[in-house]
Every structure is written in structure tokens, then in C-alpha cells.
């Protein structure tokens, strides 16, 4: 396994400090190696031990750490300089009005603010505070200063705040923060551009993404076919979500009853062989491939040229179809990310994991299709997003929501991979 990229999560003293735990966890799920730095105020909200236990690294909070320089310690020398120089990104969760002000004015009166001045790594701030504090001209001016300096701001959401008010200032979704970190790692100089896009779902501007959807049909005769229960909803939701994130989307679709998602390049196909030809033709121009189609594993060896008549019992000779996903894995460019789906009815996770190895894909979305509530022909889905090293549960949600979460994972994976390539080269 490649060495994980180190990122530093700076936790400031706000009520949303507990949410940093989930951010740290998701950064780990994304294959990163988070270290945590806390302000003294943050320690009033959450124990350093929580972060130390999750990350396996000591949490730094004081500039005057007695252990600094001690032999055998993980951090040595001038700690803040060390931390500042060895991290790939500094992400502040939550960024309070106070920490934004101290960053903006270059005040270096604790470990985190000193590290901010000492690092050349990209800095990401995820503000969270009371709506009036958020809207205050002082806070907005500080944000503007940071933005101009290239700091990436993950805009807070609107909603119920801990103070009982409703408005802007609620910490952005943890997954949005993690997706931003991944994006920044891939494009460290893009801070300004990202700042403009902050608050939107990030990740696929300028990317070409190929998605397969629907259930293939294998002809028995001119009017009959072997099909399956796939509705195409998951693939179409992925296509629409990828498009709204700014991707060029090639949607290769077996028959469905769904309207074409706006702005996507729809390539209609019927059989698995047609899907295979269409996918391989578009593979070279695709940076991400997500194969959500339910592809028939068998076809009729010799489809009848005319409609078959009812004439007593009949045996259909079936032959296996080509495994498109396997071929894609073999033929793709090395930097193309390939994500498959696995429909399973028993030992879902274990079978799905085995399929990931068999297919050689970078990741699989594993679905349990044994029930009627989720999976085939349903509006809802649940499962796992697994890579050889990581596994993220996709708890039950609509397919539209699940599409966003799958894309978050895909973006993370892609950025982590391209970062690893950049670090190696
Ligand atoms: N797939 C494919 N070509 C096939 C069959 C499946 O590209 N001929 C792709 C699907 O689009 C999906 C993944 O492979 O992304 C897994 O599909 P699934 O039906 O779960 O797996 P199978 O390979 O068919 O294995 P099995 O039916 O034995 O579970």
C-alpha cells in the first residue's frame, strides 16, 4: 500500500468541534493520514484523547510542549515548523470567527496560528459560528483577506444553529469538507478558483466521466429478450449528479423508461455486446468510468431470425457474454479511475470484496439487492463503497443522494491517486 498522505486538521474552539471527529474519520477512509492540532479553546469542547485514539498520533495544542525534541517522540525539533513543513494540507474544522481573525492578521499566539504562518501547504477553512457573527463585516473582511491569500473556504450551510437561530453559519457537511481537501491536494494552486466555487459540490469540472446504466437485453428472437430488473435509476442519478458538478458525461444506457438527463451525451444501446463496443470506443477519452449497468452474463447462442412459434418445450442454448468491466480495467489509461457495481443477495460485503479483486477495478459500489426496499427498480439504495484499502458504508438513502456520495468518494479517490502520482514523479 502506498504511504498515506499526511494532512493536518486544526480544531478551533466552537460547538462544532465534535464534527471534526467525523471529518478526521472520513479523511482516513479516503486513504489520508490526518494529524490533529487543537487550540486551547477547542479542548474545552472535545478531549484531545478522542483524536489521538482515532488517528494514532499525538495531538498537539501547545507551543510549549515539554515533549518537543524528546527522543523517541513522533515530533521533534521545532514542532510547529516541523508540522508545517511535513503536512500536505492544513484544514481548519471548525474555523471560528476568532481563528479566522487571527489567521487574517498574522497573530501567532498558539500552535495552530503559528503553524498557519509557518506552512506553505494549502490551507482550507470550514467556518462555523452564529449567523450574526458570520455576517459581521469584521468576519467577512477577514474571510476576504484569507480568500485573496489563496485560502480555500468551505462555505457554511444554512440551517438550525446551536445558538437556536436559523441562518448561515452551520459547518458544511463533513463530506463536502473532505471532498474539498481532496480537491485542494490535487490542485494546490487552485485555492482561489475553489474559493469561488466553495459551498458547491466540488470535483468534476473539466473531467470526462463515462457511466453505464440500465439492464441489457439479449435477443431470443426479434420480439423477445433476456433482460433483468434494472431500472437504470442509479446510473441516471449518477449521470445527472456528475453533470451538475461540471463534468462532461457520456451515458451509455441500455433501455430504461427514464428521460435522458440534461446535458449528458446519451449513447443508447440494447445488448451487452453493443454496450461493450460503445464503452470501449469512449474509454480513451474518459478519466472516470462508473459501470452501474446490469449487464447480462449470458446471451442466446443463436437468436432466432424470425419470431419463434409456440411448439412444445424449447431449450435455449446460452453462452457467456464478455465481461466489459474486466476489459475496461485492462484497456484503460493508467490514470483512469474505474468503479464497478456489485449486485449481491447474500454475504453482501464478502462477495462484493471478492468481486473487487476478481474484476481488478479501483472501487466497487456493493449493493444488497435481496430486498424490495432498496436496489433494483427502487428509488432507494444502500451499500458500501469499497477499494482494496478502504470501505465506506453508504447508508440507505435515495439514489439521488447516493449518487452524490458515490461521486464524493470517486473524487476523493481520483485526487488521492493523482496526488500520489504527483508526489512520486
Ligand atoms: N459487468 C460487466 N460485464 C458483464 C457483467 C457485469 O461489465 N458481462 C459489470 C457490471 O456493470 C458491474 C460489475 O460488472 O459493474 C458487476 O456486475 P455483477 O452482475 O454484480 O457481477 P458479475 O460479474 O455478473 O458476477 P456474478 O453475476 O457472478 O455475481
Image (cartoon, rainbow, N blue to C red):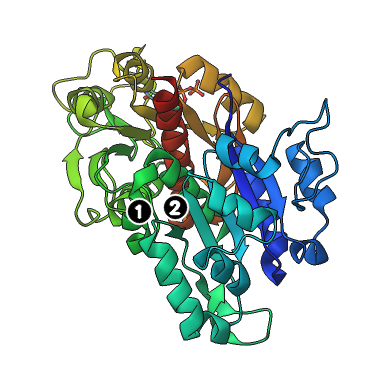
Q: Residues within 10 Å of mark 2 (few under 14, many from 20)?
A: some
Assign the N terminus to one quadrant of the image: top right
Q: For the point 47% across and 40% down, which residue is it?
A: 412
Mark 2 lies on a secondary structure that is helix
**In the picture provided, is 125 more to the left or to the right than 195?**
right
For disc 2, the marked residue is 404
- Report the front residue among 285 and 70: 70
Q: Quadrant of ligand 1?
A: top left
- Report the front residue among 253 and 223: 253
Q: For the point 49% across and 52% down, which residue is it?
A: 123
Assign the C terminus to one quadrant of the image: top left
User: From mark 1 to mark 2, how far is it between C-alphas?
Assistant: 6 Å
Q: For the point 40% across and 30% down, which residue is it?
A: 418
Placement of 13 over or under 358, stated as above or below? below
Q: Where's residue 175, x and y in %?
A: 54, 53
Mark 1 lies on a secondary structure that is helix
For disc 1, the marked residue is 241
**CB of residue at label 2: within 8 Å of ligand 1?**
no
Q: For the point 39% across and 56% down, which residue is it?
A: 150
Placement of 188 over or under 86, stated as above or below? below
Badge 1 vs badge 2, beta-carbon distance below 8 Å: yes
Amino acid at each position: 500500500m502506498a504511504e498515506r498522505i499526511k494532512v493536518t486538521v486544526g480544531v478551533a474552539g466552537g460547538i462544532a468541534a465534535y464534527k471534526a471527529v467525523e471529518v478526521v474519520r472520513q479523511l482516513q477512509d479516503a486513504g489520508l493520514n490526518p494529524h490533529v492540532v487543537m487550540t486551547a479553546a477547542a479542548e474545552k469542547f472535545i478531549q484531545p484523547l478522542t483524536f489521538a485514539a482515532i488517528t494514532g498520533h499525538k495531538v498537539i495544542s501547545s507551543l510549549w510542549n515539554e515533549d518537543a525534541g524528546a527522543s523517541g517522540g513522533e515530533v521533534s525539533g521545532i514542532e510547529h515548523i516541523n508540522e508545517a513543513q511535513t503536512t500536505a494540507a492544513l484544514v481548519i474544522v471548525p474555523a471560528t470567527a476568532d481563528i479566522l481573525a487571527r489567521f487574517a492578521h498574522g497573530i501567532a499566539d498558539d500552535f495552530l496560528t503559528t503553524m498557519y504562518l509557518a506552512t506553505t501547504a494549502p490551507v482550507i477553512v470550514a467556518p462555523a459560528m452564529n449567523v450574526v457573527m458570520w455576517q459581521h463585516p469584521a468576519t467577512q473582511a477577514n474571510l476576504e483577506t484569507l480568500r485573496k491569500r489563496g485560502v480555500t473556504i468551505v462555505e457554511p450551510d444554512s440551517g438550525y444553529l446551536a445558538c437556536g437561530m436559523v441562518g448561515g453559519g452551520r459547518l458544511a457537511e463533513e463530506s463536502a469538507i473532505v471532498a474539498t481537501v481532496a480537491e485542494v491536494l490535487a490542485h494546490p494552486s487552485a485555492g482561489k478558483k475553489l474559493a469561488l466555487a466553495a459551498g458547491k459540490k466540488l470535483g468534476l469540472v473539466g473531467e470526462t466521466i463515462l457511466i453505464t446504466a440500465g439492464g441489457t437485453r439479449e435477443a431470443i428472437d426479434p420480439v423477445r429478450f433476456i433482460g433483468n430488473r434494472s431500472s437504470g435509476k442509479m446510473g441516471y442519478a449518477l449521470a445527472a449528479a456528475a453533470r451538475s458538478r461540471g463534468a462532461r458525461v457520456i451515458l451509455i444506457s441500455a433501455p430504461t423508461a427514464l428521460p435522458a438527463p440534461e446535458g449528458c451525451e446519451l449513447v443508447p444501446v440494447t445488448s451487452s455486446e453493443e454496450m461493450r463496443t460503445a464503452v470501449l470506443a469512449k474509454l480513451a477519452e474518459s478519466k472516470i468510468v462508473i459501470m452501474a449497468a446490469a449487464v447480462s452474463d449470458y446471451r442466446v447462442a443463436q437468436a432466432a431470425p424470425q419470431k419463434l412459434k409456440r411448439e412444445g418445450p424449447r431449450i435455449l442454448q446460452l453462452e457467456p457474454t464478455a465481461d466489459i468491466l474486466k476489459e475496461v480495467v485492462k484497456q484503460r489509461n493508467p490514470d483512469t479511475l474505474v468503479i464497478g457495481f456489485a449486485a449481491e443477495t447474500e454475504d453482501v460485503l464478502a462477495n462484493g470484496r471478492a468481486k473487487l479483486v476478481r474484476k481488478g477495478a479501483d472501487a466497487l459500489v456493493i449493493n444488497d439487492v435481496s430486498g424490495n426496499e432498496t436496489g433494483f427498480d427502487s428509488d432507494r439504495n444502500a451499500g458500501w463503497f469499497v477499494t482494496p484499502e478502504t470501505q465506506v458504508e453508504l447508508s440507505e438513502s435515495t439514489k439521488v443522494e447516493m449518487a452524490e456520495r458515490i461521486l464524493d468518494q470517486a473524487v476523493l479517490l481520483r485526487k488521492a491517486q493523482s496526488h500520489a502520482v504527483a508526489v512520486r514523479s
